[in-house]
Image (cartoon, helix red, strand yellow):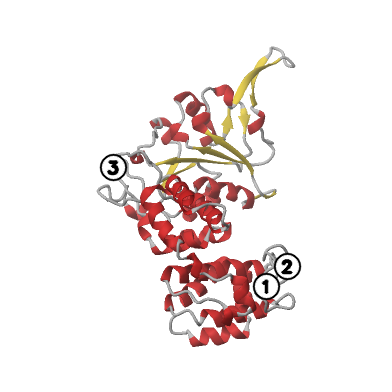
Amino acid sequence: MGINTLTLVTLNDAVQMIAAGGHKKCYKLLSSPGVGKTTAILQLAETLKWSGGVGYQAVYIYVPEKRDTSDIACWIPDMTVNPPVLRLVMNPAYAFDPAKPVLFILDELDKGNNIIQTLLTPTMTNPKRLGDILFHPESITVALSNYSSDGVGDKQQDHAVNRQTTVFIRNHTGKEWVHGYALSHNCHPAVMGWALRNEQLWEMALLNPSTTNPYIPNPKRAKGINRAFVSARSLMQASETVWEFTAGLLTDHQMMAALRGDIGDAGALDLASFVNVHTEVPVIEHVCINPLKCVIPQHPSAQIMTVLSAVTYLGKVVRKEVIVGGHNGNNNGNNNGDNNGPVPVATCISNWLTYLDLIPSVECQRLFNDTAKEESKRLFDMLTSSPAYSKWANKHEHIL
């Protein structure tokens, strides 16, 4: 397919490349649909430093919906000078302060028509400009699109491609997605557990055009009535569906119908089977209060869901977003009958580690340790300073 796997990078790699030298060139990121490019670049705009401070002005343009140049900016006569001249005036939705750097995001650039692409081409060169509007010299333009082989209507003229540094992004692995995004965005533990255990979800048809993988998009496969597929984006949609189901807002049938629309037929059937073991997963608050009275999951899927639920919950406890047994609106007033007041963080950690030792799975011990490191430095620092953690880690030193 013309792609050397040695040149593929992770989305995180691409973000670091843009941060290092994006103001000197225009990076164009190509990936399979739904990898999370837009979210990553918007986050970069908030955190990236420039010579005058931190944070770029983010100007996001979804290129395919623009049919005429006036959708972005208009040429208006300036009668204050003699002779009068035409000046470009930005649509208020895309206005920015020229005195500060802007991170210009051209989403789905290759799906735009030629007129719009031509208008946007000067934003990719140095000095960057749009018409006669010059950008701050530290400004960055990032173009986002999909592989043309994915069959989603991508096209761009050669003269514009020559003004870009095109970077080819590989799909996440399950571990990269869970630790790098899902864990910190309230993804349902069942969805994270499924993503960790099924690496088929992250395969790229680009690298294996003959694949029969039923979960992923493949332009060579006949398109059926349901064209939904698994991606980082659609898994978060599926997460919302599963949260609604576990909260009792959806029936089994309604959950299945929604999941089919979220992630396709094969994904829905497989994930639903994973979700159905959620009754083995204890309420983590109850574990933090009295671990010996909580159900011990026996199904491997339920064990993974329990560990991921615990990492998310303990992270919130350490950040004081929830108070165990404190009736702060996060525990539904249910303290399992074993708590006379708020439980200290150190006790929560100790009780969880006592419970974790009861789960008959070496994989879960390792998963907890690895995932806690990724959840936040604050959580892992609190864990490693706990005598209970030191005792637990010494016991499992051979597997950690």
Seen from the viewer's position, the closer of residues 198 and 100 is: 198
Give, as a three-letter code, the residue at label 3: Arg
Cα distance between the residues tagged 2 and 3: 52 Å
Q: Residue at x 65, y 32 (%)?
A: 93
Seen from the viewer's position, the closer of residues 58 and 319 is: 319
Q: Secondary structure at mark 2?
A: loop
Q: Secondary structure at mark 1?
A: loop
The image shows residue 42 at horizontal and vertical percentages of 58, 46
Give, as a three-letter code, the residue at label 2: His
Q: Are marks 2 and 1 in contact (CB under 8 Å)?
A: yes
Displayed quadrant of residue 90: top right
Cα distance between the residues tagged 3 and 1: 52 Å
Give, as a three-letter code, the residue at label 1: Asn
**Pointer 3: what residue?**
221
Q: Are marks 2 and 3 in contact (CB under 8 Å)?
A: no
The image shows residue 310 at horizontal and vertical percentages of 56, 70
Residue 270 higher or lower than 109, as above or below = below
Displayed quadrant of residue 82: top right
Q: Is the residue marked by circle 2 packed among few (<14), some (14-19), or many (20+) residues within 10 Å?
A: some
Residue 160 higher or lower than 352, as above or below = above
**Pointer 2: what residue?**
327
**Pointer 1: what residue?**
335
Cα distance between the residues tagged 2 and 1: 8 Å
Using the rendered image of the protein, determine whether residue 250 is visible from the camera's viewpoint: yes
Give the mark nearest the N terminus, 3 or 1.
3
Q: Is the residue marked by circle 3 packed among few (<14), some (14-19), or many (20+) residues within 10 Å?
A: few
Residue 180 higher or lower than 254, as above or below = below
The image shows residue 6 at horizontal and vertical percentages of 34, 55
Give the mark nearest the N terminus, 2 or 3.
3
Displayed quadrant of residue 391: bottom right
